[in-house]
Image (cartoon, rainbow, N blue to C red):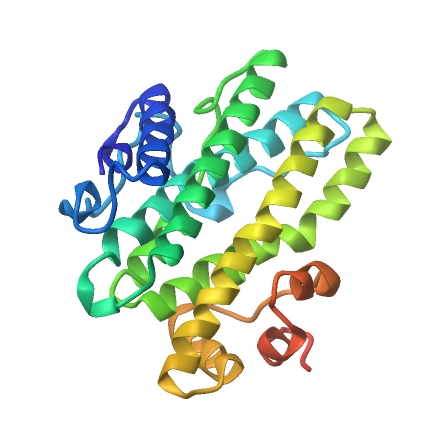
Amino acid sequence: MAALSAANLDDKISLTRQAAWGWFSGGIGPGGDVALPVPSRPGRPEQPNLVAPSQLKRRSLRSEKGRFALLHAIAHIELNAIDLALDVVARFCDPKHQMPRSFYDGWMRVALEEAKHFSLLRERLAQIGGAYGDLDAHDGLWEAAQETGHSLDARLAVVPLILEARGLDITPSLLRQMDEVGDHDSRRIFEIIYRDEEGHVAVGAKWFRFLCLRRGISPSHEFQRLVRLHFRGPLKPPFNDLARARAGLTPGFYRALSSAGT
């Protein structure tokens, strides 16, 4: 997919939208453009500089610099999320996976919504006098993609059901903090992301269960096995059990993997 390889941010957003519209109009589909070789890494601008997570500075959200750093970090997550969704479609579209067309429909819809999120965050960063790329970032999300590139089951377990589900856990606190500092413009963006991300986790949970039930195995047990194999460290509470459950990710999946125990 051209959108995956695009390094220019405006091109990536435009090509993602074109790919989604082409997909839903029937212009492209499995076996078409998405069957092209998948790049080992997506296209990226020269900035931000990628560093180890431990090198990223922590800042208070009560300062404008702190809120800028938060918006920048989430923008980086959303940019990676565009490519992660596109990569699922492109990487796992071969006949051996025997996935229904609706599986790919779901991930193309996710890619389109992630592009919307990234665009909103870029606009907000510009409003407060900066741009995406001004601060360092880390490469953890794409490292997770590389770790699970060989297995659709592992990809769904780690990316939507751990990494995206984490957004459901932390966003309610971010909304409260934006209220406290009076940053209503950023809060509105986080509300949109929170609402959409619950749907993205639901897409992951639905199709992870599908894969497991097709093989006649327990989804929760297989999730725990794959997480222990492909994800470093325990899952950290607090968990937004209600939002996770609405998305189809019930506590039986993740509580046994928590640093707080069952």
Horizontal relation, residue 209 to residue 251: left or right: left
Residue furthest right in the image: 180
| 222 versus 95 height, above or below | below
Which of the 4 quarters of the picture holds residue 145? bottom left
Q: Residue at x 30, y 31 (%)?
A: 44
Q: Position of residue 107 (x, y in %)?
A: 41, 49
Residue 152 in view in this figure = yes
Horizontal relation, residue 41 to residue 199: left or right: left
Q: Looking at the image, how many numbered discs can be counted on the residues? A: 0
Residue furthest front in the image: 26
Horizontal relation, residue 151 to residue 155: left or right: left
Residue 51 in view in this figure = no
| 54 versus 134 height, above or below | below
Which of the 4 quarters of the picture holds residue 127? top right
Residue furthest left in the image: 37
Q: Position of residue 2 (x, y in %)?
A: 22, 33
Q: Nearer the viewer, residue 205 or 259?
A: 205
Q: Position of residue 29 (x, y in %)?
A: 25, 46
| 14 versus 219 height, above or below | above
Q: Nearer the viewer, residue 22 or 129?
A: 22
Quadrant of the rendering where the C terminus is positioned: bottom right
Q: Residue at x 67, y 28 (%)?
A: 67
Quadrant of the rendering where the N terminus is positioned: top left
Q: Nearer the viewer, residue 207 or 91?
A: 207
Q: Residue at x 31, y 27 (%)?
A: 15
